[in-house]
Amino acid sequence: MSFDGIFTHLMVAELEQLVSGRVSKIHQPYPNEIVLVIRSRGKNQKLLLSAHPTYARVQLTQMSYQNPDTPPNFVMMLRKYLEGAILGKITQVENDRVIHFHFSRRDELGDLQNIVLVVELMGRHSTILLLNQATGKILDAIKHIGTNQNSYRSLLPGLEYVNPPAQHLLNPFTTEKPEVFETLSELPELSGKTLQQKFQGLGGDTAQELATRLSARPNEKLRVWEEFFASLTTELTPTHYAGNKEYFTPVLFESLQDLPHESYDNLSELLDAFYHDKAERDRVKQQGGELIRKLENERKRNKNKLKKREQTLIDSENAEEFRQKGELLTTFLHQVPRGATSVTLPNYYEEDKPLDIALDPALTPNQNAQKYFTRYQKLKNAVKLVGDQIAETKEELRYLDSVLAQLEIAGPMDLAVIKEELVNQGYIRQKGKKRKEKPSQPEKFQASDGTEILVGKNNLQNDQLTLRTARKTDTWLHAKNIPGSHVIIRSAEPSEETLLEAAELAAYFSKYRHSAQVPVDYVQVKHIRKPNGAKPGYVIYENQKTLYVTPEESILEILKK
């Protein structure tokens, strides 16, 4: 089931527990999402309102979110009107995907204000609006929509709020039985599509499930209809189905019974499980996009720099030739005509082999000789430096590759740490006042035999984990010659099974996570050291052994502590 009108109806019922609660905090962690912390029934609960074009939803959530350094304008408006407000009621517009949260609060003069927070879950047109109930006017919206974007209605502060276009279909929760029976009987054919044309708020998979049940008992259509809608209350079983396409449903669907599935205690818990990883990847893509572009540009610049320096090294092999040409020009200066573009001179370095020497016609013979000596001296001096410069540039590229690999596997909470690292390394500038962040911690896993495994998710964590947290006798793993995470097994002699499990984690948290075979080195921590001045995350080691493993995402769920 998509987040259709049926699911919206059930979510409104689940959120009834918030009614009479007081809003204590309001955050806007991402451009299209709001989190209200509501104190209700003796505990704080986080209400997530998402107007994401793909993952729009309303739910309670247990997930943690990173707030931006500067609060957006919309959240400031919400705080002005809703902090301390009491949630009076939650209503759904018919069976549409539109929810109204009705709040009341006293203003500075002590007058009672009634404010409505509207959430429209309409795919890419999803939005969140704050309304003055008395005037019906928009106080602000998370997305400002003008007449040039929508000719039907504008969503701008100060304008009167216009509801989304009405569908003029039957509400399956309020339509009387006789009318439902008559409508079902008049359908030219029984399918998900025909049901959607008659009843409001049926998503494609919900309509198909209803059609499947009705078709199985064609002489008991009304009873089947009543049983299905009764089950939404009496047999609520939030379920996630996995297959070629993923589904989430509020009850068990007969049409999906052959697919692997997992059930949850409530709708919000289901949505946390279903959307969290998808939304996380999308947020990283959005938020990390700027970092990735900056790093890719830096990588390209270093690639060009490396190419030039390697060419300089190749050219330096010809330095002796330039010295010889300079000396021959000096020795046979009287034989060199002015204004010539080249000259052939006797070569006492290789007898019987006269040497052709290119000349600059604008220079005198002596100036041409000095030009060759200058080129010789530059290349000779370059040889002393270029080797170190090439090594330095390769180290720079290795570091950039490691950070890019980390961005591929990072969650939104990891981005702040990676960004801080890049600020410290001088790749990006710190904007605004630096926030005091909690030190990030490596991810914890547990091997099948109970041994703890730690995984660094960025270079700062890798350094902390390997050089400070790990004991000298612990076992360290890393994908061989591949950017990736440092992995620590908290054991000097792990079992073969634990070693393989940790190697799979090291392979998964590397640049080659999608490869069939990934080499993973392992060694005790005492054989690892960090060179002076090395970039974060870079270490050298010896006495290692190598395993070859195939990384699978399923290992994360199996070993997650």
Image: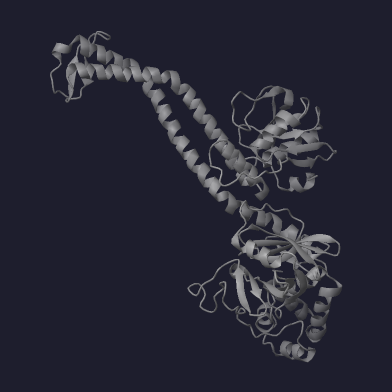
Question: Which residue is drawn at the image coordinates 77% and 82% (left, top)?
Answer: 173
- Residue placed farthest to the front in the image? 109
The reply, left or right, for residue 361 in relation to residue 228 is: left
Above or below residue 263? Residue 456 is above
Question: Which residue is drawn at the image coordinates 63% and 82% (left, top)?
Answer: 167
Q: Nearer the viewer, residue 44 or 231?
A: 44
- Residue 26 is situated, as x and y percent measured from the top left of the image, at 70, 60
Judge whether residue 513 can be spotted in this image.
no
The reply, left or right, for residue 3 in relation to residue 325 is: right
Above or below residue 278? Residue 410 is above
- Residue 57 is situated, as x and y percent measured from the top left of the image, at 69, 66
Above or below residue 30? Residue 556 is above
Quadrant where the image shows the C terminus: top right
Q: Quadrant of residue 532?
A: top right
The reply, left or right, for residue 235 in relation to residue 203 is: right
Above or below residue 190? Residue 521 is above
Quadrant where the image shows the N terminus: bottom right
Q: Nearer the viewer, residue 158 or 454?
A: 158
- Residue 287 is situated, as x and y percent measured from the top left of the image, at 59, 52
- Residue 311 is situated, as x and y percent measured from the top left of the image, at 39, 27
Q: Nearer the viewer, residue 147 or 228?
A: 147
Question: Which residue is drawn at the image coordinates 61% and 36% (left, top)?
Answer: 483
How many numbered circles are shown? 0
Judge whether residue 59 can be spotted in this image.
yes
Q: Nearer the viewer, residue 173 or 73?
A: 73
Q: Quadrant of residue 261?
A: bottom right
